[in-house]
């Protein structure tokens, strides 16, 4: 009977120490996840604030379709400093202007049209206008991508 008591005691100690180790791991993981959340949120906020973007309001909202304006109204006039604001600005302000400027054509489509022009056509007034549109769509895509990265990281930081 003594052997059974010794084995039971060893088993109880093993389970207890395993539980204590698991608690320590979970506390450390919780601390690291809390730190990561704060770090990501601070980085996204600080990077967006440095861009000094004010969300559109008033007449600026009239320049986009009603559905886009409805999404933007909740942020009207505020500084863009959160992931959801970055997504709204990218998808409902920049994209709306890109679609209006390019008649719904993408950068890839406009760039393809421009590349297909001869040097003489590129030098013409129409060619120069197409080059300007190409540049506008390129910059719009770049800005949207960067803002959407901010949104993605802000979302990851909340997990």
Image (spheres, grey):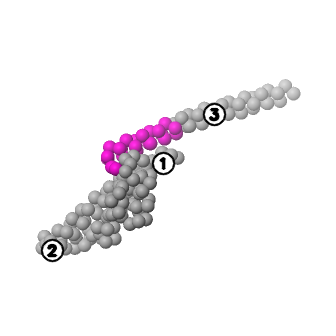
Q: Nearer the viewer, mark 3 or mark 1?
A: 1
Marks 3 and 1, Cα distance to the nearest angstrom? Answer: 25 Å
Residue ID at (58%, 34%): 27
Marks 1 and 2, Cα distance to the nearest angstrom? Answer: 47 Å
Marks 3,1: beta carbons within 8 A: no
Residue carrying label 3: 23
Q: Position of residue 157 (x, y in %)?
A: 48, 45
4 up-or-down from 38: above or below? above
Q: Is residue 11 left or right of residue 132?
A: right
Q: Secondary structure at mark 3?
A: helix
Q: Residues within 10 Å of mark 2 (few under 14, many from 20)?
A: few
73 up-or-down from 49: above or below? below
Residue ID at (84%, 25%): 2
83 up-or-down from 22: above or below? below
Report the residue that reaches farthest toward the right: 1
Residue 49 falls within the magenta-colored stretch: yes
Residue carrying label 1: 156
Is there any visible trace of residue 148 in the rendered image?
no
Q: Nearer the viewer, mark 3 or mark 2?
A: 2
In this picture, which residue range is highlighted in magenta?
A: 33-54
Is there any visible trace of residue 159 in the rendered image?
yes
Q: Position of residue 100 (x, y in %)?
A: 32, 68
The quadrant of the image that shows the N terminus is top right
Residue 3 falls within the magenta-colored stretch: no
Q: Secondary structure at mark 2?
A: helix
Residue ID at (60%, 32%): 24
Residue carrying label 2: 121
Q: Residues within 10 Å of mark 1 (few under 14, many from 20)?
A: few
Q: Is residue 27 left or right of residue 119?
A: right
Q: Secondary structure at mark 1?
A: helix
């Amino acid at each position: 009977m003594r052997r059974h008591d010794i084995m039971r005691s060893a088993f109880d100690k093993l389970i207890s120490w395993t539980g204590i180790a698991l608690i320590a791991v979970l506390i450390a993981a919780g601390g690291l996840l809390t730190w990561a959340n704060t770090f990501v949120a601070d980085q996204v906020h600080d990077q967006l604030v440095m861009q000094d973007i004010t969300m559109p309001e008033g007449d600026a909202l009239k320049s986009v379709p009603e559905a886009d304006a409805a999404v933007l109204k909740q942020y009207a006039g505020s500084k863009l400093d959160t992931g959801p604001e970055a997504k709204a600005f990218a998808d409902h302000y920049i994209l709306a202007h890109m679609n209006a400027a390019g008649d719904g054509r993408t950068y890839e489509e406009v760039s393809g049209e421009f590349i297909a022009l001869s040097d003489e056509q590129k030098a013409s007034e129409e060619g120069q206008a197409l080059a300007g549109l190409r540049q506008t769509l390129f910059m719009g895509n770049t800005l949207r991508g960067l803002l959407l990265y901010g949104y993605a990281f802000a979302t990851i930081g909340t997990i």
